[in-house]
Image (cartoon, grey):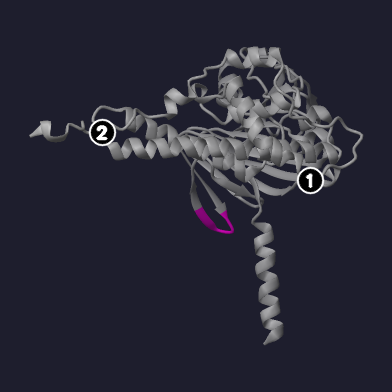
Amino acid sequence: MIRKLTGLLLLLASSLALAVPAAYVHEMSGSGSATTKGQSRALAVGGLLESGDVISVAKGTMTVKFEDGQIVVLQENSRFAIEKYDYNKQKVAESSVAMSLLSGGMRFITGVIGGTRKDAIAMKAGTATIGIRGTDLAINIAGVNYVVTVQDGGIVLSLPGQPAASLNPGQGAAGATNQPVQPRPVIQLSAAQIAAVAPTVAKAVPATNPVGVTQQATLVATVEKATNLAKAAQAPGATDAQKAEAAAAAQQVQQAIVASLQATQAAIQTALTAGAPQTTATGTAPKAATQPGVTPQRAAQSDVQQIVTTVNAALPPAQQLNPQQINQIQQQIAPTLSTQPTTTSTTTPTTTQPLTTEQQQILQQQDTTIQQILTPPPITQPPTCGTSCA
């Protein structure tokens, strides 16, 4: 009896260990779902994903961000499998990822894992195998036909029975999987081929630095809820109850922002200590190519600016943080960060110094109306008139 009970406890512990969130839904339009061990569930913004999940996007697009900063953008009518996601935060070089685009289209951008060890990522798209060389790529598969473009970095594309071919930034390839790969400038692809990957290439994506998955998922979900409640509270005929609910949701956004900043800072520190390159751990927000063949710039930002970028990427444009709000939040989280254990590392340590003038100027260019959007109109109280109301 004791042996059986012990076995059940070990099985339970094992299943709980496998349920560690690997990624979250950063943004989505339309509808999508995830299947875990045969059990399907609907997905929404902030939904958590784990190793072994198969993601389906029925309508619209879905942007998924992983713990190490890796980004996957899925097109409509796509299926994508997270076959294995093992992010070793203590030894980044021992991490590994295996994923597969089962159908449809996707954009893939490497994070800390791919930026630290390129052969750590195994990717398949239909019958094609893709070798990653630190990259930003888009691919669409439809039966035996495929289209792939490389925005940054490079890949090695291998098709069944065909010699492998390298694709560099600004290059693409298209055709049937039973034909040799012929790399050529993206601009030389046909309009239909470019259109096949356009929905993911043009999609704005979050920064590629590591994050605390649960905290970031909570932030985007809280912002989504608060935004919807604020709209309802500002509509004609809104009730006092709706306004009160929107005000409470706005307060929850502020709390979620603080938690997200703390988790992001800790995740970057951990990645640097574990051996991730500075340019990978601090990441950047890849820019979508505005024209076929245009390669986006991916220079690393300062650590503080990267944290700001990460949080703002989770907020709608009208709700992004201004410098004053960032400095206030930094003061809130400073005591917590100062109590975290420090480790000796040869990498550049992260800091929580005040934003530079240049950083503040950059942020000031963003929309700073978060309070106007999230804070609903005040609840009106009936006039107090005493006995004069008789």
Across and down, in percent, residue 382 comes to 21, 33
Circle 1 is placed at which residue position? 89
Q: In this picture, is 386 found above or below 213?
A: above
Q: Judge by depth and name the residue closer to the eye, 342 or 234.
A: 342
Image quadrant where residue 350 sits: top right
Q: Which residues are magenta?
A: 36-40
**x%, y% of residue 345?**
90, 37
- Dot 2 falls on a residue whose secondary structure is loop
Q: Residue furthest left?
A: 390
Q: Quadrant of the C terminus?
A: top left
**Mark 1 Cα within 10 Å, few/some/many (few <14, many 20+)?**
many
Q: Is residue 88 left or right of residue 215?
A: right
Point out which mark residue 358 bears.
none
Which disc number belongs to residue 381? 2
The secondary structure that dominates the magenta segment is strand
Q: Secondary structure at mark 1?
A: loop
Q: Residue at x 45, y 35 (%)?
A: 250
23 lies above or below 321 = below
* Quadrant into which the N terminus falls: bottom right
Please name whichever residue, 112 or 239, is drawn nearer the observer in this view of the structure: 239
Q: Amino acid at mark 2?
A: Gln
User: How far apart, in angstroms, are the residues tagged by discs 1 and 2?
Assistant: 53 Å
Q: Is residue 39 magenta?
A: yes
Q: Give the percent coordinates (x, y) of residue 181.
A: 75, 27
Q: Residue flagged by tag 1: what amino acid is it? A: Lys
x 57%, y 41%: residue: 217
